[in-house]
Amino acid sequence: MSTSMITPDAISTILKNPSPDSSSDVPDLVVQILDLKPVGKGSKYIFTASDGKMKLQALLQSSFASEVNSGNIQNLGLVRILEYALNDIPGKPDKFLVVSKCEVVSPALEVEVKSEVKSVDNRIVLKPKEDMELKSAGNGILLKPKQEIVAKSAAQIVQEQHGNMAPSARMAMTRRVHPLVSLNPYQGNWTIKVRLTGKGNMRTFKNARGEGCVFTVELTDEDGTQIQATMFNEAARKFFDKFELGKVYYISRGTLKLAHKQFNTVKNNYEMTLNENSEVEEASNEAAFIPATKFNFVKIDELGPYVQGRELVDIIGVVVQVSPTMSIRRKSNDETVPKRDITVADETNKTVIVSLWNESATTTGQELLDLADKFPIIAIKSLKVGDFNGVSLSTLSKSVVLVNPDVPEAEKLRSWYDSEGKGKSMASVGTGMSSSPQSGARSMYTERVSLSYIINNQSLGEEKPAFLNIKACVSLIKADQTMWYKACKTCNKKVTEAIGSGFWCEGCQKNDEECCLRYILVLKISDATGEAWISIFNEQAEKIIGCSADELDDLKSQNVEEYQSKLKEATWAPHLFRVSVAQHEYMNEKRQRITVRSLAPIDFAAESRFLLEEMKKMLMWM
């Protein structure tokens, strides 16, 4: 343990060489930190540097503040001084040591290291304290020496502390534990101490180099800084079972690179890769020093601005409905995955549908189904916000789902729901979009454009779909088009007629005796500036036509004239549309595809306020 020993006569060496030309000129200087305390606003720290024989006042520059705050540099700890300068103290003969670069050799020792004038076998030994305690003896006072302290070197003290520790703790002491915020791709060896706050599923992939597997984890240190770590192939198989959600680990021998923001939702400029040579050790009995999963909850009525964005959200709410599990077949690899939809409400009196996937659908979903009559509280971290039914949420492999979590927000929600929420009528956040921009929800009165703006901008939606709001009337619904498809009653996927009888659902992999009809049609809309053909699906089409596809099919089979009259009634009524504009190729020609994502009736009071605001803007430019 020679590297952990205090350097004999380190202070004398510093005094003899007050200004080294370079760090290569600095000999090995290990000292003990005494009386460490902040100065000024706490960005700098002063301490007494001790080699056991001599002491020297010293200053740690502000760059070391995070090291002190994180506990890496500690009072009574040992540091190796790598770069320094020795300054005069005005009006005094004393010198002041300014440390500009150092590294931690050991955390705090049990005692201050003191040595006799002589060194024994090149070691610094503790000088026994001759402190006396008073003890009464009859009418007098008897002075009795305290028990002598056994002389130990600093290295022995460190070694004894190490010997009583688990491997993970020894790993932390033999290497300095770095805060995540200090890591960068150009550093050498480092060790971090983190809690596993997110763990993805093991995924397989194929590329030109062959097949492989990969999974990612989300790591959080005691400062709340997060980073995403990825493991491939051998490393993935080695660490997948070792990493358990919520546990604390020491990790070293990983690499860092700039984060791919399109694949990384953790707020960090870097991402980590662990290979089969990386070291991961569980830190036992240290969970209290690392924060648990941190949530940044978004109210349900404030989800609108996140639709189709890259930013993930956290929500907490009361589970008011749980659907059965369904099987969904992925188009990418033809793999079947379980899915379960739950409806969640909060004190904004809005609801949203959350789709749980994979293990969240089966394990957590079943737990929610068992507790459905008790209306459990659920908190979910890292949800993707989609535009199905206006606003919808979906779990990812990294999502964290907690049922009845022990957080203050859960207690508040439970109290609200039991006292008043249970008896209230609540609307979906997608269909009941607020017309007030102050509410935080996406409003039909923001991002408003005319049809001519879309039609005249043929490059709109080239890189990614553009989401816009328009006010228009349905001007034509072709009665002779195919307006619906036969759908599975469970998953809404298209079904085919089975051999013999019934209908076959490829998604659910089962036969059903009955199916339902769901709208899928195109219609023409018009405003004062132009007209365009748009695609519209079941939920929005039902609002426009005023009946379900099954009901319209029955009407068509009974009376064609009434069927055509029903379609005509649906025209020339104004609506507010939220649409996506994307590019698609047809007959080797790029065309715009406009799809309705949500629909709302005109709120004439809100529309009047909107028009007044628009007129005010026009007057400002006159």
Image (spheres, helix red, strand yellow):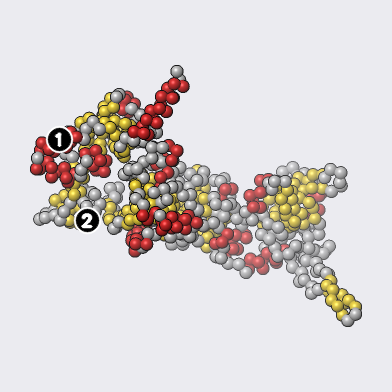
Q: Can residue 205 be seen in this view?
A: no
Image-based side of 405 in relation to 423, left or right: right
User: Residue 110: percent from the left, percent from the top?
Assistant: 70, 65
Image-quadrant location for residue 287: bottom right
Q: Is residue 389 visible?
A: yes
Q: Which residue is drawn at 28% across and 52% down?
A: 328
Q: What residue sits right under mark 2 in the picture?
A: 509
User: Residue 416: percent from the left, percent from the top?
Assistant: 43, 55
- In the displayed structure, would residue 516 be above or below residue 3? above
The residue lying toward the viewer, choosing from 20 and 514, is 514
Give the position of the N terminus as an image quadrant.
bottom right
Query: Marks 1 and 2: CB-CB under 8 Å?
Result: no
The amino acid pointed to by label 1 is Ser
User: Residue 313: percent from the left, percent from the top?
Assistant: 43, 47
Marks 1, 2: nearer the viewer: 1
Image-based side of 314 in relation to 281, left or right: left
Image-quadrant location for residue 604: top left
The secondary structure type at the circle numbered 2 is loop
Q: Which residue is drawn at 10% across and 43% down?
A: 557
Q: What residue sits right under mark 1 in the picture?
A: 565
Give the position of the C terminus as an image quadrant.
top left
- State the CA–CA distance, disc 1 to disc 2: 39 Å
Image-quadrant location for residue 291: bottom right
- In the displayed structure, would residue 201 be above or below residue 139? above
The residue lying toward the viewer, choosing from 114 and 132, is 132
The amino acid pointed to by label 2 is Gln
- In the displayed structure, would residue 458 be above or below residue 170? above
- Specify few, some or many for label 2: CA neighbours under 10 Å numbering under 14, 14-19, or 20 or more: few
Residue furthest to the right in view is 139
User: Residue 231: percent from the left, percent from the top?
Assistant: 45, 53
Of the residues under marks 1 and 2, which one precedes in the sequence?
2
